[in-house]
Image (spheres, rainbow, N blue to C red):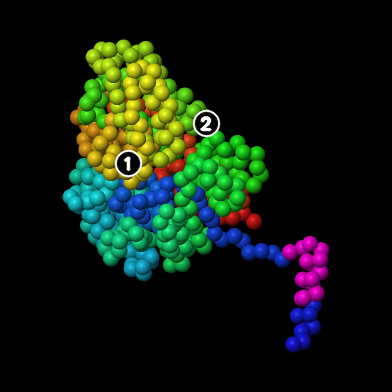
Amino acid sequence: MTKTPIAAAAVSLLTLGLALGVTPATAAKMDATIGMQLEPPNLDPTGGAAAAIDEVVYANVFEGLTRFGADGAILPALAKSWEISDDGLTYTFMLNEGVKFHDGTVFDAEDVKFSLDRARADESTNAQKALFADIASVDVVDPATVKVTLSKPNGSFLFNMAWGDAVIVAPESAADNAANPVGTGPFSLTEWVKGDRVELGRYDGYWGNPVKLDKVTFKFISDPTAAFAAMMAGDIDAYPTFPAPENLVQFESDPRFEVIIGSSEGETILAMNNKQAPLDNIKIRQAVVHAIDRQAIIDGAMFGYGTPIGTHFAPHNPAYVDLTGQSAYDPEKSKALLAEAGVSDLTLSLKLPPPSYARRGGEIIAAQLREVGIETEITNVEWAQWLDDVFKAKNFDLTIVSHTEPMDIGIYGREDYYFQYGDADFKAIMADLDKATDPAKRTELMQAAQKKIADDYVNGYLFQLARTGVANAKLKGIWPNSPTQANDMTGVYWED
């Protein structure tokens, strides 16, 4: 076969280019592999409590009426706008049109009604059912308009609708979302290899701004040493919450990487079972709290990354009150409180889920409690065990967990919540907060709520979890902060 003169010239130019060390331009990278320490137990954010679910699907696969932005602002999502009645009871949402679920079914107001009614139903399995408790009715005005009527004013309603637990699902696919999630987001599930990875592909029928990546792989690596090796080898492009903060200094000195330090909504606590003896005695809980040296835990378990807290509230929130002094490290006071309570030879169970903050922090706390005369029986549990045994069955004395849901102090009003507090005065504060719309009044009530749980020593408040991430220096758009538990890939791209 003979070449045409043009083809022959092209070959000659290519040969010359290779000889000079010049290579043809390569196509831009269109996929990203994101590291996560924990694998989600399922992929349905409306039917599971694990943060790892939202970390994969929030904004990527599923969308709600509203959503959190990278800075924590409440933004329009499936609702393009809304109107609120003067009495604060009626929210009328105007919906985006031309939206389809990944299976091709059309999104409209009927899906919003179905989703909100399903979430608030008596038989609902939604982990954050309280978000929907004030909804009195959901009415379809027309296919692009839905009216939500509340039983009482709730100044947090638009905020509540931005949670992952409030995403909109379709009646045709809702029952199968745990294993086969079908949402309206810019990515759809292509493969889930249990124990290894979840793969998402670009959904070409997406209604909104197109994403820049064709494929996102969430790779699950629980071992911090393996996570470090995977990043160094280039097998992982970004680890938004890197599990080995001790290795961050090595990434900082390597120009291939960017270390991303931000804040999170993760209040890390030593949770206590408030209705189980002996922790139903406030003096015992107070003794436990005063035995804890927060800074030693931050330094020893988190290598200095973390902000001490004295209540269940994020320090970056303008309404935060610093109450750390009220529960300061004071082992002698701890011993005196145990003596006042008439308790000696106390042994408490301490159940630790997989994250390094829990396992490493648990060993430090056990040593600190031993110094004041409290022994602990440590049990390391996997997340599925923790959810069943601690969160659901409440079969524990102590546990360590980071609550990564945004501004979730309202959980203390739930009597059936795993640490079993549900104080009537606290619930009254939260009821007043729901009714309040004046910003100054809301701040006053949020601060009263923080003080109340600190006064009652409900839990040991340790530190606000820092978001310690690392990424390939050319991968842009990773959230530096974590206003909600999400790895939002909708704005991520590769720099040329």
What amino acid does circle 1 point to? Answer: Trp
Q: State the residue lying farthest toward the left.
A: 122
Residue 333 spot, x, y in % from top left: 34, 13
Examine the residues drawn in magenta and state their main secondary structure. Answer: helix
Q: Give the structural element (helix, strand or loop) at label 1.
A: helix
Q: Residue at x 38, y 56 (%)?
A: 62
Quarter of the image for the N terminus: give it: bottom right
Residue 94 spot, x, y in % from top left: 33, 57
Left or right: residue 493 compared with residue 192:
right
Q: Residue at x 38, y 45 (%)?
A: 51
Q: Nearer the viewer, residue 494 or 253?
A: 253
Q: Residue at x 54, y 59 (%)?
A: 31
Bounds of the magenta span? 10-23
Q: Identify residue for label 2.
A: 303
Nearer the observer: mark 1 or 2; the answer is: 1
Where residue 180 sits, quadrant-wise, is bottom left
User: Residue 342: which disc?
Assistant: none
Q: Give the structural element (helix, strand or loop) at label 2.
A: loop
Count up the numbered dots. Answer: 2
Find out whether residue 97 is within the magenta segment.
no
Question: How far is mark 1 from mark 2, CA to CA?
Answer: 25 Å
**Tag 1: Cα neighbours inside 10 Å, few (<14), some, or many (≥20)?**
many
What amino acid does circle 2 point to? Answer: Phe
Relative height, residue 35 to residue 430 (above, below): below
Find out whether residue 22 is within the magenta segment.
yes
Q: Is residue 187 visible?
A: no
Q: Is residue 344 visible?
A: yes
Quarter of the image for the C terminus: give it: bottom right
Q: Identify residue for label 1.
A: 386
**Tag 2: Cα neighbours inside 10 Å, few (<14), some, or many (≥20)?**
some
Relative height, residue 6 to residue 456 (above, below): below
Q: Nearer the viewer, residue 455 or 219?
A: 219
